[in-house]
Amino acid sequence: MMLTLNRQVPAIALLSLLGLSALTAVMFVDSGVAPLPLFAGISALGAVSWWTVKVFTRSARNIAFDFSVLYIALLLFSPPMLQDLSFATRGTKLDQAVLLLGFIWVVAHGLDLFSFVRQDSIVLALIAFWCSSVITGVASILTISEADAGMVAGSIWGQTRPVLVMIVFTSVVALLSARERLRLLHWAFVLGTGTVLVGFAQYNGWQPAVELSTRIYTRKAEQQAVIDAMSAVGRAYGTFDGQPNAFGTFCMIVFCMTLALAATQLVKHRWLALAMTATSASGLAVSWSRGAVAGALVGVLVVLVMVSLKFAVRVGATTVAAIAGLWQVLPEETLRRLQDLLTLTTDNGERIYDARLAFWSSNFDFWTRHPLLGGSGVRLAPADSQYIGLLIGGGIVGIAVFLLVISVVLRRLVQIARNIEHPLRYAALGLTASVVAMLVNGISVPSFMEERVMEFFWFLVALIATPLASERFGEGISSE
């Protein structure tokens, strides 16, 4: 007979796992022992133990839910490892191992990959983009003398993860009802609040949090520059490995989605969504990511246009009041960056994108030598742009296929958002706004390719865009 566990067990187990890991790391910081192996080891042991218990005590449907929560927790909080390897541009993390295990589990349970790909246009488009990346990588090794095979492998692995996320979680969430998917969405946002709290601690200079986060969530290079920026001007990066812009992009996605969810008529969900909207907006502010702020503003417009005039007036009034209040309490340095965004200039009259123009010019010169497929595995100046990065890393073919992927995603999301009977319509509306915001933010950062953000985005796509069981079997739409 199938055993059952109390429904609170997933929450208690997850919080205990994260708390124990963080506490152990803190205990060893002052003693000089590196906390990373301890954090990783305890997390892995706890994850394996928890997963083993679930396999023997839970139904496949409950396993699907718990696996998804575990993956998001590891995605947001597991530290980067093996950064010394050439292919690990940001370091590998435990979520990647769990993702591979999930893929093996899905295939072992009878997934017909060929049939699956043919039926899902988003996965098919993503695989086309992955194929273009592989072709670029192979061509680079064969034709570009300075191309590094390890870096090419790392780039291909980076493009593989969105495909794996879509395959695994499209299969996993297909077992869940609309109500369970919304609950999983709230879990993801609640876990995201944890990284925002880390960002607050960094911004306010709370020393234990600053020391712990700079030791655990490090960049492969220029970590001292990150620490200097955090201490000098207060830019926070949460758990996003020394990347304030990636942290800002994550907060932007959560902001757009929770704002849309606040339009729901369910009062309980509305207040929860509004609380998360305020939290993510605060995280966006302490990241100081001007591109993410610009993207969030455009995302707000998308939400307002697609919801209703009444909701637009209510949100507009709330936004004006919030801005007026924040303007009185935000530090002068934060206000200066917001002013830079509005005027596109700095205090000394320089354009805010002048530094990037030099990088873009260098990268553009590289692209002109490899226009069709671009080049991979070559050390270049940072692209600092989704579109420049696509051009140099995939050429005309790469950027064309990427735009195809985004168009397929948007088409599916808009279909759901416009269906007034669909229980996920507001979530689809929020993700539509997030995609548009990421396209805007992509002018100044590689918004769709950033570590942790990339996997989180495609998890949301799988969660919302995967047809409900009632849709697949032609029974009409149901929230059960």
Image: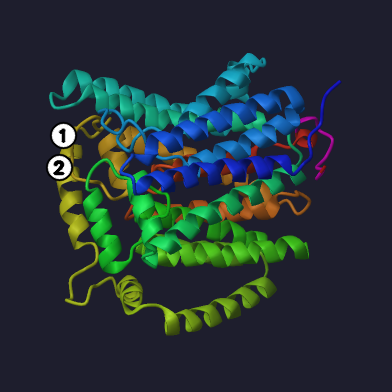
The residue furthest front is: 31
Residue 285 painted magenta: no
Foreground pick, 402 / 232? 232
**Label 1, residues with CA under 10 Å away: few <14, some 14-19, many ≥20:** few
Residues marked 2 and 1 touching at CB (< 8 Å):
yes
**Label 2, residues with CA under 10 Å away: few <14, some 14-19, many ≥20:** few
Query: Which quadrant is the N terminus positioned in?
Result: top right
Relative to 77, does residue 398 appear above or below in the rendering? Answer: above
Foreground pick, 200 / 121? 200
Residue that numbered label 1 is attached to? 369
Q: Is residue 133 left or right of residue 49?
A: left
What secondary structure prevails in the magenta region? loop
In the rendered structure, find residue 95 and report the number of the disc placed on it: none
Residue that numbered label 2 is attached to? 365
- Residue 339 shows in this picture: yes
The spot of residue 212 in percent (x, y) is 38, 51
Residue 474 painted magenta: yes
Q: Is residue 409 left or right of residue 366?
A: right
Amino acid carrying label 1: it is Arg
Chain part drawn in magenta: 472-479
Residue 141 found in image quarter: top left
Q: Is residue 272 left or right of residue 136?
A: right
Q: Secondary structure at mark 1?
A: helix
Amino acid carrying label 2: it is Asp
The residue shown at (55%, 82%) is 321
